[in-house]
Image (cartoon, rainbow, N blue to C red):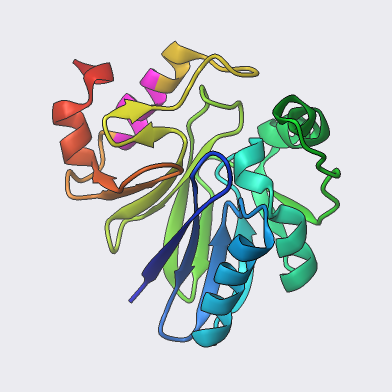
Amino acid sequence: MLQIQGFVVNFASENTYIVYNENKNAWLIDPGNMNEQETKAIESFISENGLKIEKILLTHAHIDHVLGLQWAFDTFKVPVHMHQEDQDVLDMLQASGMRFGFTVDPVKADITYINEGDVLELDGEQFKIYHVPGHSPGSVVYHNDNQKFMISGDVLFEGSIGRTDLYKGNYEQLIDGITNKLFILDDETQVFSGHGNPTTIGFEKQYNPFFK
């Protein structure tokens, strides 16, 4: 049985997630921790539960989702999984930091590129990958059909969608991807977003104003 633990971190109130199982094996998703207190909270949870981080996953590479990425890679020494289309975004990290008024070093990590239709496994639990660009060019969603949940990053939120006015953003592309890849899934599927509260596919199909 998979468990999900979220941490709200950094200036953007970003959701960093840990997905783990009864074997204590775990994935760290979108490490956005930017200060000692946030990092300690994540470290303490991992330590207290005896978890082994086997993979680091990115839904996309915007600055608020990767501020803790170098720490994560240096600490756990496991590959970072992301879509190749967001490599440019990750490479712009320093410039993005300057726009927000702080210094961020370039990330030096082992990167494994993932694609639409790939399947990642955590002790037999399968996560299908959907490439849903529009918020960023390489935005992906990690979907576990067995327990009916997804980690959606900034693709889909409770009552909203990701911004499309950023680098290589595209409103029509995002709406099309959500409609044709996510809204065809079971209505009960939980959506764990990059910001804000969890929601469900059924709720968003019915109430999200972007799909009226």
| Residue 160: quadrant of the picture | top left
- For the point 38% across and 27% down, which residue is it? 161
Task: Give the magenta range.
Answer: 175-182
On the image, the x and y values in percent for residue 110 come to 80, 56
On the image, the x and y values in percent for residue 22 come to 41, 84
- For the point 16% across and 39% down, which residue is it? 202
Depth check, front residue: 113 or 209: 209
Depth check, front residue: 42 or 191: 42
Q: From where the camera sits, is residue 41 visible?
A: yes
In the rendered view, would you say 97 is above or below 30?
above
Work out which residue is located at the far left of the displayed protein and give it. 206
Depth check, front residue: 201 or 164: 164
On the image, the x and y values in percent for residue 5 come to 42, 66
Q: Which image quarter is the N terminus in?
A: bottom left
Q: Is residue 10 left or right of residue 79?
A: left
In the rendered view, would you say 102 is above or below 45?
above
Q: Is residue 200 left or right of residue 103?
A: left
On the image, the x and y values in percent for residue 166 come to 60, 18
Residue 132 is inside the magenta segment: no
In the rendered view, would you say 118 is above or below 94?
below
Q: Is residue 211 left or right of residue 54?
A: left
Q: Is residue 177 left or right of residue 139?
A: left
- For the point 62% across and 55% down, which residue is it? 33
Q: Of helix, strand and loop, which mostly describes the magenta segment? A: helix
Q: From where the camera sits, is residue 114 visible?
A: no
- For the point 61% across and 74% down, which residue is it? 43
Residue 179 is inside the magenta segment: yes
